[in-house]
Image (tube, rainbow, N blue to C red):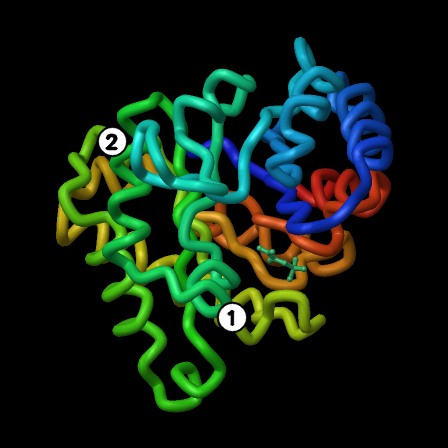
Amino acid sequence: MRRPFIAGNWKMNTTRAEGVALATELAKAAESITKCDIAVCPPAVYVDAVGAAIRGSKVGLGAQNMYHEPSGAFTGEISAAMLVDLGCRYVILGHSERRHVFHETDADINKKVHAALKAGLTPIVCVGELLAEREAGTTRHVVETQCNGSLAGVTAEQLAGLVIAYEPVWAIGTGKVATPAQAEDVHRDLRAWIASRFDAATAEKVRIQYGGSVKASNAPELLSQPNIDGALVGGASLKAADFLGIVAGV
Ligand code: PEP
């Protein structure tokens, strides 16, 4: 039985004080959360302060990105070991904004996945199609190609412990949520892809989150789908009440 996992991607939002206040409120509320794992992924510069605010609580700490090299002359970049040093357990990799705004390729993401795993982080690997790709009927091909590329060389054991986030690009930050049936179809395809590339037991273990305009009102139906194991939440993770409203839908 897969334990649901709800993670908040704060993107480039909050001040230090706002992030700490949000994290503190979540840490307190999390005391009574029993049905799922939760995590927050603040901006990199606030990971340390937010980590201190949630230390010892049920709220996990994640980062939004990292670089694959362990150290060296890579101005502006952050390594997996640095994130571990700050108490991170998770790192989002291949978010659609990284793919489409910063032109990260599956090969780039694959290097990051291996570096994150080596450092002991749990990658949250994002995949998802553009609206034109959905309309062209190529969604399955797109997400499988992204999985093939970004998860190349990962062992079944590593895969079982990581998280995949299916995030249709047309639903991210747009208010247009995939219907539970549309999301479940892709999640089922992704699990079938894992079973065919690895094995059925591994496919049963991998947690696949849905992301794209998730909010308290649509979360219960999305999260009740058999292959949807949680959510990666952007906009609605910036207010404790909104995020906790989603968690309540598990
Ligand atoms: C995201 O950033 O991963 C996301 C799904 O954003 P939103 O919930 O705002 O659509």
Number of marks present in the image shown = 2
Q: Indicate the position of residue 131 as horizontal and vertical percent values.
A: 49, 82
Give the vertical position of 86 relative to 191 (above or below): above
For marks 2 and 1 on the same chain, the one whose residue lies earlier in the sequence: 2
Tell me the residue at 81%/40% (across/down).
15
Identify the image quadrant of the N terminus: top left
Q: State the residue in front, 60 or 11.
A: 11
Q: State which quadrant residue 112 falls in.
A: top left
Query: Helix, strand, or loop for circle 1?
Result: helix
Label 2 sits on residue = 158
Give the vertical position of 213 relative to 113 (above or below): below
* Spatial separation of the CA atoms under disc 2 and disc 1: 26 Å
Q: State the residue in front, 133 or 67.
A: 67
Q: Is residue 41 left or right of residue 100?
A: right
Amino acid marked by disc 2: Gln
Queried on whether the Cβ of the residue with tag 1 lies below 8 angstroms from ligand 1, the answer reads no
Q: Indicate the position of residue 41 as horizontal and vertical percent values.
A: 61, 37
Question: Where's ligand 1: which quadrant?
Answer: bottom right
| Disc 2 residue crowd, few under 14, some 14–19, many 20+, Cα 10 Å | some
Label 1 sits on residue = 169
Q: State the residue in front, 141 or 109.
A: 109
Q: Indicate the position of residue 201 as horizontal and vertical percent values.
A: 22, 36
Q: Indicate the position of residue 240 as horizontal and vertical percent values.
A: 82, 38
Tell me the residue at 32%/39% (across/down).
68
